Amino acid sequence: MQINVIKIGGNIIDHEEKLASFLRDFSKLQGPKILIHGGGKIATKLAEQLGIKTTMVEGRRITDEPMRDVVTMVYGGLVNKKIVAALQGNNCNAIGLTGADAQVIIAKKRPVKTIDYGFVGDIEKVNDTFILSLINQNITPIFAPLTFDPQGFMLNTNADTQASAVATALASHADVNLVYCFEKKGVLSNPEDDDSVISKLVPETYEKYKSEGVIYEGMIPKLDNAFAAVRAGVKNVIICQAEQLHEAIEQGQAGTYISLK
Amino acid sequence: MQINVIKIGGNIIDHEEKLASFLRDFSKLQGPKILIHGGGKIATKLAEQLGIKTTMVEGRRITDEPMRDVVTMVYGGLVNKKIVAALQGNNCNAIGLTGADAQVIIAKKRPVKTIDYGFVGDIEKVNDTFILSLINQNITPIFAPLTFDPQGFMLNTNADTQASAVATALASHADVNLVYCFEKKGVLSNPEDDDSVISKLVPETYEKYKSEGVIYEGMIPKLDNAFAAVRAGVKNVIICQAEQLHEAIEQGQAGTYISLK
C-alpha cells in the first residue's frame, strides 16, 4: 500500500482560490491520502479582533489559554471543517481530526526552559491503528495542527512536525510519501532562480550543497527533519509547490525528493 | 446491543462546572454511547465581539455567512474539542464530529418560505455504518450541531433534531435510548412543582395530560418529536435533568420516559 501524507501551510489556507484549487487537486490523488493543514493568519486576525495579543518566538506561536481557545476555534473548527466540507464537495470522503479525536495524536505540554510556549504540545504517540481503520474505509483524515494531553486538554502543535509524526507512524504499514507543499517549487540550487529546483537530495548531495553554501539558513532544519523522516522509514519526503502536487508525486517531475539513496 | 444517545443543551455548555460534572457522569455510562451537544451562548458572545448581529426567530438562529463561520468555529471547534479533550481526560475515547466528517450527517439547506434561515440544514441522511464502525472500536462520537450539504458547505442544525435523527438511524441496529437532558427533572404534572415528574408517558396518558392542560405550550412540539422518535423505532426517549443522567437511564428512577406502551 502507498499512502500520501500531504502538508499545506498557511499561505494556501489564507488564499481562498489557491485553497479551492489545491483541494480539487488533492481530491484527485489516487489511493489513500492524508492532509495536515497549518493555520494561517486567520487565528492572528481573530485574536486581534478579540483583543488577544499574538506573540511569536522564532516563528512559533506562544499559546496562552485565550490563544489556545482561538486556535482551537480557528484551526479545529473553521479551517478544518471548511476544508472537510469542500473536499466532500469534490467527492473526497474527508474526516476532520485534532489529536484529541479518538486519541489520534497524544502529546505532552512542552516543558518550560528559557521560553514558555504555553499550551504547545510535543508529540508522543500517533494512533496508527485508528488512522488505518479510516483509510480502510476509504475515509481521508484531515488533521488540524492541534494535539492533546491525555489529562484532558488541547495543545497547539506545529503542522510540519505533525505531518512528519503521522508519516513516520504509518511507515511500517505502507510506502509513505510525505509531501511538504510550500511557496517555492522545491529546494533551489540558486535562491535567485525559482526554477533551479534540485530534483533529488540524498545525504551525500545534501552535505555537498551545505558545504558549498547552496543550502543554508532556514532550509537546514527543514531538511534535517526531512532526512530524519526518511531515516525513520518514510519512503520519500517531497518538498514542492502546492500547485505542482500531482507532478511532484509522480517521481521526479516536480519538487525536490529527499531520500536515502 | 444497547446504545445511549444523549443530548445536552446550551445551559450545560455555558456552565463550566456543570459541564465538567456532566462529562464525568457521561464517561461512566456503560456500553456504547453518543453525545450531541448544543451551542450555548458562546457563539452569540463571539459574534457580538466580532460585530456580527445575532437574529433569532422562534428560538432558531438565523445563519448568514458570517454567522455560519462563527458557529463552525464555536460549535465545531471550541465547544466540540473541549468536550472531546475533557472526555479523553475521563478515559472516554471520544471523537468530535460535524455532519461533514465522513459524511456522517447529510443535510439540505432549508428552502426559503416566509423566513430565510440562511445556512440552516434539514437532515436528509445519517451514515449509520460509520457511526457503528466507531462504536465497534469503542470510540464515542460527539456531535456538534452542524451538518453539511454534499455540494461542499457547512450548515447549522438544531441539536435536538440532530439527536433524534441519529437515534432513529441506529434504531434498526440496536436498542436505542434517546436522552434529552434539560434544566427540569422531567415532564412535570404541575409546572409549579419541580418534583412533580411524570415518570412515564405513553400515547394515551400524553393525550390525557394534553386535554387536561397539564402539558401545554413548548412541551407539546418537544413531546411530539419524542413520540415520533419512538414510533420510528427508538426504544425509549427520556427527558431528564443532566444531573440525573444515571438515575434516568436506569428506567423509572428519574426523568420522564416516553414510550409506546
Image (cartoon, coloured by chain):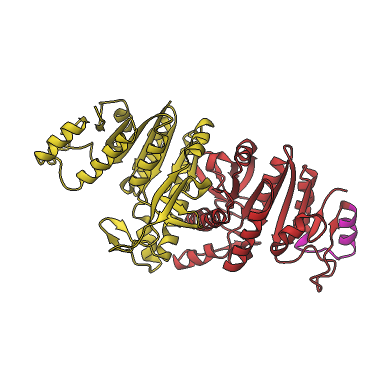
Chain colours: A red, B yellow
Q: Is residue B11 left or right of residue A230?
A: left
**Residue numbers of the magenta segment:** A204-219
Q: Is residue B55 left or right of residue A20?
A: left
Query: In the image, residue B209 lies at what x, y percent?
Result: 13, 36
Q: Residue at x 66, y 48 (%)?
A: A33
Numbered circles on residues, count: 0
Between residue A120 and residue B54, name the one nearer to us: B54
Q: Is residue B40 left or right of residue B70?
A: left
- Find out whether residue A93 is within the magenta segment: no
Q: Residue at x 80, y 59 (%)?
A: A256
Q: Is residue B22 left or right of residue A4?
A: left
Residue A15 seen from this side: no
Q: Is residue B201 above or below residue B162?
A: above
Specify the quadrant of the image occupied by residue A213. Answer: bottom right
Query: In the image, residue A4 lies at what x, y percent?
Result: 70, 49
Between residue B140 and residue A68, name the one nearer to us: B140
Between residue B63 and residue B202, name the one nearer to us: B202
Q: Is residue B188 above or below residue B59?
A: above
